[in-house]
Image: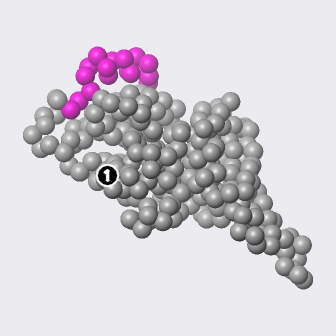
Amino acid sequence: MSPVVVGVDDSEECLRAVEWAAGEAGRRRQPLQILHAFIWPLLGVPLGPAPGAPPEGGLRHAAERILATALARAQKVAPDIEVTTSLPEGEPATALLHRSHQAELLVVGSRGLGEVGGLLLGSVGARLGSEAACPVVVVRGPVTPRGPVVVGIADDGESEALLAFAFAHAARTANVLMLAHVSTERSASPRSLALPEHRLARWQERYPAVTIVQESLTGQRGRTLTHAASEASLLVVGSHHRHELSALMHGSVSQTVLHHATCPVAIIPVHR
């Protein structure tokens, strides 16, 4: 089975991501893999304890403690799932991008996500959101398990992949699904933005327990979706860009919400 993979460091934000990932792995009935990228061997620094220091000191033992703490947190949230840990040597984003080809889902915390500087300096979440081969969830702020799942839909070219992810998640969490149709044109009518009834009926037949709300919104897409998801349990958006600098320069919706949303953000790769 393809695992849910969560990247961790020693921050509280990443431990919240572990909790979210463990809960999601449990809902999906998939194994969870906790990954901590161990970059120090590549830098040629000593990995063991310093001379005269306790034997449990040193960088390698510190990395192993990070994994042990995350493992305990995951097992507390979802005791019935299979959980493994991994300590690959390498830079965090590169290690996680490599795992994205075998993972069902990647999860990371929001540590290091700032404004433009965070993007240019290569924050892990920003890079994964634009380059990963599988969906990515960036866990931001306090997690609200009860709240609508909001999916931002701008056009038909991306809506199927987003709807598939959002409907499945709403069904697993028993939350309302809000279809947020965002247009930058103030002249667009609500009817023209709504999902056609025959398409909506197909999804409703597949997920009969999901309650659907459609909202037609106008404004800058990233900011408008961020506002619409202010009380959401998850915001789902698409990513067209395969490089984070390209996403930044082209005003990517996924990168905008990644830096401003107050709830976990799911970024779905969209291939046209």
Our reading of the magenta stretch's main secondary structure is helix
Quadrant showing the C terminus: top left
Range drawn in magenta = 193-209
Residue kind at label 1, given as amino acid type: His
List x then y, in percent, for residue 218: 19, 45
Q: Quadrant of residue 106?
A: top right
Q: Is residue 134 visible?
A: yes
Residue at image coords 31%, 52% = 250
Q: Tell me if 124 is positioned left or right of 63 in this view.
A: left
Quickly name the residue at label 1: 250
Occupied quadrant, residue 183: top left
The residue closer to the viewer here, 179 or 133, is 133
Q: Is residue 167 visible?
A: no
Q: Residue at x 41, y 36 (%)?
A: 270
| SS for dot 1 | loop
- Residue 166: x, y in percent? 43, 34
Residue 71 in the image, given as x and y percentages of width and height: 73, 52
Left or right of 111 on screen, residue 40? right
Q: How many marks?
A: 1
Residue 51 highlighted magenta (yes or no): no
Give the x, y percent position of residue 110.
51, 59
What residue appears at the point 69 percent right and 49 percent down from the top-left corner? 34
Task: Name the residue nearer the viewer: 204 or 7.
Answer: 7
Q: In screen coordinates, is 259 left or right of 57?
A: left
Of all residues, the one furthest to the bottom in this rendering is 52
Check the image and name the residue furthest to the left: 187
